[in-house]
């Protein structure tokens, strides 16, 4: 998670945060609050695939890093703290594709030559496909704890940049595929970082945080509806737009001493969301091509100290939740294509206290419906 500074003299190394983060993650993985959750792990950045072309970065024949293949550059003039210029410059944002915007070379005498932002960190991939498979695949806890801990023990803080957009897009793509065979799972993303996004803006001309927030909004609002929790190690309140777009309102801020507490807060929130939101199950005969009638769904639970389940009132939308009797509603009030059942606060609290879970009845006309 620590990023190497390009100019170490003017940018002294950042304090070690990876060590306390690893310790905090191991604490959370061994905590009973993660029991029965499925947890996976991935890192960013990773290196680009062999043969990847980044305009402004040097091809292999030019040597390592940024070099020069341009004879018109006097003496291969060196840019302090960066390296040398290359001849494969870009002319517009779209030339860069996944590797950021097309910007002027940082220092004269290169005139009109331009480079993709990703050329500054040519060992950092901006391709979501390179982040589409987690280091540790999702599996149920505590069974996955050993694999997670082993992966953490082998990882050092060796990042050259913070390609958040590419990493998040690859993760979202992976989880969408995962959800197809795990449709009854509520999915959340925890984005932990010690730096602001500084690479892989997507070549749109927009700033990185705007693009990432747009992606987080799609992750949260489109099926399978994945909230994006943001944990910033350091003063990273600038990431709040990402958290807000991802349905979690604001960034959790921590340092090396508080990161364990903040991670516990994140996972407590994830577990709490799991009590109040449920994926709609497929009807028993869905394999025969039959589609669920959303006017024939009923919800039941057994209150604390009760022996018989009670039916929860369907209220249509969040604004009609009763503060005492509670209720339930779909994430799509029109019933055209809902994917989840949401519980009103009073019902949610009742289920938390009882610990009985929720029963969803399919095929009978919805009862206790408020018009």
Image: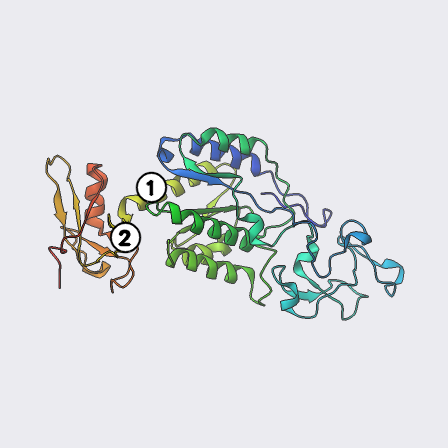
Q: Which numbered disc covers residue 348?
A: none
| Rendered location of residue 56, percent (x, y) | 73, 61
Q: Decide if residue 195 is in sight here.
A: no
Calculate the distance from the C-alpha at mark 1 to the C-alpha at mark 2.
34 Å
Q: Residue at x 84, y 62 (%)?
A: 70
- In the picture, measured across the screen, residue 306 lies left or right of residue 38, that is left
Task: Give the quarter of the image for residue 356.
Answer: top left
Residue 138's place in the image compared with 239, above or below, is above
- In the picture, measured across the screen, residue 127 lies left or right of residue 258, that is right
In depth, the one of 343 and 360 nearer the eye is 360
SS assignment at label 1: helix
Please identify the quadrant where the C terminus is shown: bottom left
- In the picture, measured across the screen, residue 179 lies left or right of residue 150, that is left
Q: Residue at x 62, y 63 (%)?
A: 97
Instruction: Determine which residue is flagged by label 2.
Output: 288
SS assignment at label 2: helix
Q: Decide if residue 21 is in sight here.
A: yes
Q: Which numbered disc covers residue 271?
A: 1
| Rendered location of residue 233, percent (x, y) | 52, 44
In depth, the one of 76 and 146 nearer the eye is 146
Q: Earlier in the sequence, mark 1 or mark 2?
A: 1
| Rendered location of residue 332, percent (x, y) | 28, 61
In depth, the one of 173 and 169 nearer the eye is 173
Say which of marks 1 and 2 sits in front.
2
Q: Residue at x 66, y 43 (%)?
A: 13
Figure coloring: rainbow
Please identify the quadrant where the N terminus is shown: top right
In depth, the one of 246 and 358 nearer the eye is 358
The number of callouts visible is 2
Label 2 crowd (10 A; few <14 / some 14-19 / many >=20): few
| Rendered location of residue 21, percent (x, y) | 52, 37
């Amino acid at each position: 998670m620590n990023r190497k500074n390009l100019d170490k003299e003017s940018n002294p190394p950042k304090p070690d945060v990876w060590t306390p983060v690893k310790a905090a993650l191991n604490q959370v993985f061994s905590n009973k609050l993660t029991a029965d959750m499925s947890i996976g792990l991935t890192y960013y950045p990773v290196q680009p695939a062999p043969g990847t072309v980044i305009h402004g970065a040097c091809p292999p024949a030019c040597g390592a890093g940024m070099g020069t293949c341009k004879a018109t550059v006097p003496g291969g003039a060196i840019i302090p703290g960066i390296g040398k210029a290359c001849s494969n410059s870009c002319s517009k944002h779209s030339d860069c594709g996944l590797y950021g915007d097309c910007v002027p070379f940082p220092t004269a005498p290169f005139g009109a030559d331009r480079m993709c932002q990703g050329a500054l960190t040519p060992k950092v991939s901006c391709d979501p496909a390179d982040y589409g498979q987690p280091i540790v695949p999702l599996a149920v806890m505590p069974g996955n704890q050993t694999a997670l801990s082993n992966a953490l023990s082998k990882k050092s803080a060796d990042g050259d940049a913070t390609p958040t957009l590419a990493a998040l897009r690859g993760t979202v793509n992976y989880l969408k595929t995962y959800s197809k065979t795990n449709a009854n799972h509520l999915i959340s993303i925890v984005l932990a970082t010690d730096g602001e996004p500084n690479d892989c803006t997507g070549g749109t001309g927009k700033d990185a945080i705007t693009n990432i927030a747009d992606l987080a909004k799609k992750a949260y609002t489109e099926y399978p509806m994945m909230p994006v929790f943001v944990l910033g190690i350091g003063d990273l309140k600038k990431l709040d737009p990402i958290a807000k777009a991802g349905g979690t309102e604001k960034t959790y801020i921590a340092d090396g001493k508080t990161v364990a507490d903040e991670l516990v807060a994140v996972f407590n929130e994830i577990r709490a969301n799991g009590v109040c939101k449920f994926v709609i199950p497929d009807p028993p005969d869905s394999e025969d091509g039959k589609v669920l009638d959303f006017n024939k769904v009923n919800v039941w639970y057994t209150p604390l100290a009760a022996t018989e389940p009670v039916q929860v009132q369907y209220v249509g939308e969040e604004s009609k939740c009763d503060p005492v009797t509670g209720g339930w509603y779909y994430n799509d009030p029109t019933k055209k294509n809902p994917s989840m059942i949401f519980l009103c606060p009073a019902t949610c609290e009742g289920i938390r206290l009882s610990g009985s879970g929720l029963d969803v009845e399919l095929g009978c006309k919805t009862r206790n419906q408020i018009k």
